[in-house]
Image (cartoon, helix red, strand yellow):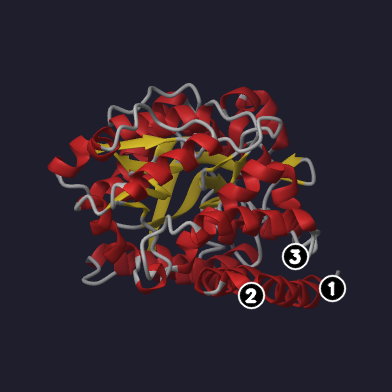
Amino acid sequence: MTNKPRTMLGAVALASALAMGTLATTAQAGTLEINIAFKGASQRAVWTQVVDEFKQAHPGTDVKVAFIDEEAYKVQLPAWLTTAPPDIVNWHDGERMAYYAKRGLFEDLTSDWAKNGWDKTYASTKEASSYEGKQYAAPTVYYSWGMFYRKDIFQKVGIASEPKTWNDFLDDCKKLKAAGIAPIAVAGRDAWTLAGWFDYLDLRLNGNAFHQKLMAGDVAYTDPRVKKVYTTWKQLLDAGYFIPNSLSYDLDSAQPFLFQGKAAMMLMGTFITGGFSPTVKSEMGYFQFPIIDSNVPTAEDGPVETLNIPAKAKNKADARAFLAFTETPKVGAQLAVGLGSLSANSQSAEPDDPISKIGFQILSNTKGGIAQFYDRDMTKEMADEGMKGMQQFVSDPTQLDSILAHLEQVRQRIYKK
């Protein structure tokens, strides 16, 4: 992020001081210290607004907020948590949360979940906020993943409705290809976009419980259920349903296939809608990834942002009060707009944007759990190897067995299992 404002430099300085513990003796009783990672002015503005509203509701509490650029924040967080942490940090659910919970660095919030009714309002994100049956995170926002598509192109080739099942989806791909339109755009140069395909095929074929065991390193990559994910994916590759040379396009260069009508669909997160022109937006639809096996509980990718209380925080009472204030339908909707996401609170008002509204409905009604996305649900080293393997697979699907054998060797080395 370039041209940081002067206040940003002050925030980084404050964060550094916190990391060194120099502010540990100056914090007053009744002072609530919050460190917030942010990207862009709108994100900083909405957090400032929420903090101001909290201060009005709790006039006896002195609140000090440090805003830190997201990339710098990731580097500094481990030092804060192990030395002199603030009272609240924001972070991510899934493996990223579990990493610190496992090491005793995040406060157990299980009693807060029960006391504040979060078991109900955040039911869809409870699993992602848990480690060994206890909750260590308070969800704020998330975003949906699904299939973007051109409504005008569907109509042009005679597709009457959005596909609900895998067979419907394959039939639609066949019609599109016969009409000379690439059914699916994919940005394989950005390996994480392929990880979205792996996630959804695994979630639809094997369910979220299996998916999380795989993400945790508890399942062999040579397991038949893992291979089935790739052989199902291979059906699409063999049929030529993806744009040609997909590995040569990143997300920015793949999206024009959709914008120009050269491709009909793309699996992606709702965060891309900000880049749609008014003309494109009016023609764009969005649907839930098709059901492959109706016996498998339907799960979704919905990366969740969170608030957490460090285990070594000094003012846990006010920190818990801030979490209770923030984890409400009203504040959830407020944060969602400012952060360009969806409220994780199922009781929040639905967003106005049509695609965001569909994403909100998909996630808030999910019964099979919400995954955090491939590289947020597992250790970085394994995720990097896995995504590299996906690129190799897309390049040459006949190498599947050797790719999986290699990933299994990596799994055993990393997880010692």
Reading the chain from its start, which is encountered first: label 2 or label 1? 2
Residue underneath mark 2: 399
Q: Mark 3 falls on what kind of element?
A: loop
Q: CA distance from mark 2 to mark 1?
A: 25 Å
- Looking at the image, which residue is at 43% across and 24% down? 348
Q: Where residue 3 sits: x, y (%)?
A: 21, 71
Number of residues whose C-alpha sits closer than 10 Å to that of mark 2, classed few (under 14), some (14–19) or many (20 or more)? few
Q: Where residue 146 sits: x, y (%)?
A: 44, 42
Residue underneath mark 1: 416
Reading the chain from its start, which is encountered first: label 3 or label 1? 3
Q: Amino acid at mark 3?
A: Tyr
Residue farthest to the right, as pictured: 417
Tell me if I can see residue 321 in this picture.
yes
Q: Mark 2 falls on what kind of element?
A: helix
14 or 288, which is in the foreground? 288
Number of residues whose C-alpha sits closer than 10 Å to that of mark 3, classed few (under 14), some (14–19) or many (20 or more)? many
Q: Is residue 352 left or right of residue 209?
A: left
Q: Is residue 299 left or right of residue 192?
A: right
**Quadrant housing the C terminus:** bottom right
- Looking at the image, which residue is at 67% across and 74% down? 403
Q: Amino acid at mark 1?
A: Lys
